[in-house]
Amino acid sequence: MKVDSTPHSGLQTLKDGLQRTQQGDTPTTGGVGASTSTATGASGDASVNLSGLSSQLHSLASAGSSDIDTSHVASIKQAIKDGTLTIDSGKIADGVLATARDLLQKKSQSSGN
């Protein structure tokens, strides 16, 4: 992921969008459930409407449901710091082979072979 640290990144795009909105043009946005924004005066205040999926994801995140086991991640970090992390290459190889088998089976089932 690249982070643009320039202080004016996207500023011109935002200004152009604001001008189009003030002139009555509808800004074009891409993607499913894209958010829309409308200007509300010369002060630059904007109103944003989020899709239902976005609201659902936000509520799940605030409820604490997570796909990441943070305590397990913390224990792995500590094991790395301590130099006690052991990596089972056989278990990794077995996982890679199992994934490859699953993908090949799904491919052969979808192609009708």
Image (cartoon, rainbow, N blue to C red):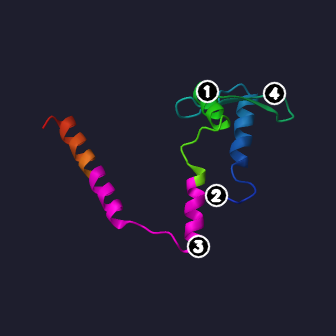
Q: Amino acid at mark 4?
A: Thr
Q: CA distance from mark 2 to mark 1?
A: 26 Å
**Mark 3, other Cα within 10 Å: few <14 / some 14–19 / many ≥20:** few
Q: Secondary structure at mark 3?
A: helix
Q: Residue at x 86, y 32 (%)?
A: 42
Q: Quadrant of residue 41?
A: top right
Q: Is residue 45 visible?
A: yes
- N-terminal of the pair, mark 4 or mark 2, is 2
Give the residue number, with chain letter if any, for mark 3.
82
Q: Is residue 95 magenta?
A: yes
Q: CA distance from mark 4 to mark 2?
A: 30 Å
Q: Which residue was labeled with disc 1?
A: 51
| Mark-to-mark CA distance, 3 and 4 | 56 Å
Asked whether 103 falls inside the magenta stretch, the response is no
Cα–Cα span, label 4 and label 1: 20 Å
Whichever of labels 4 and 1 marks the residue nearer the N terminus, that label is: 4
Which label belongs to residue 40?
4
| Mark before the other along the chain sequence, 2 or 1 | 2
Mark 1: secondary structure: loop
Task: Say which label, 1 or 3, has the lower sequence index.
Answer: 1
**Residue interval drawn in magenta:** 72-99
Q: Nearer the viewer, residue 5 or 38?
A: 5
Q: Which residue is mark 2?
A: 3
Residue 57 location (% of width, % of height): 60, 33
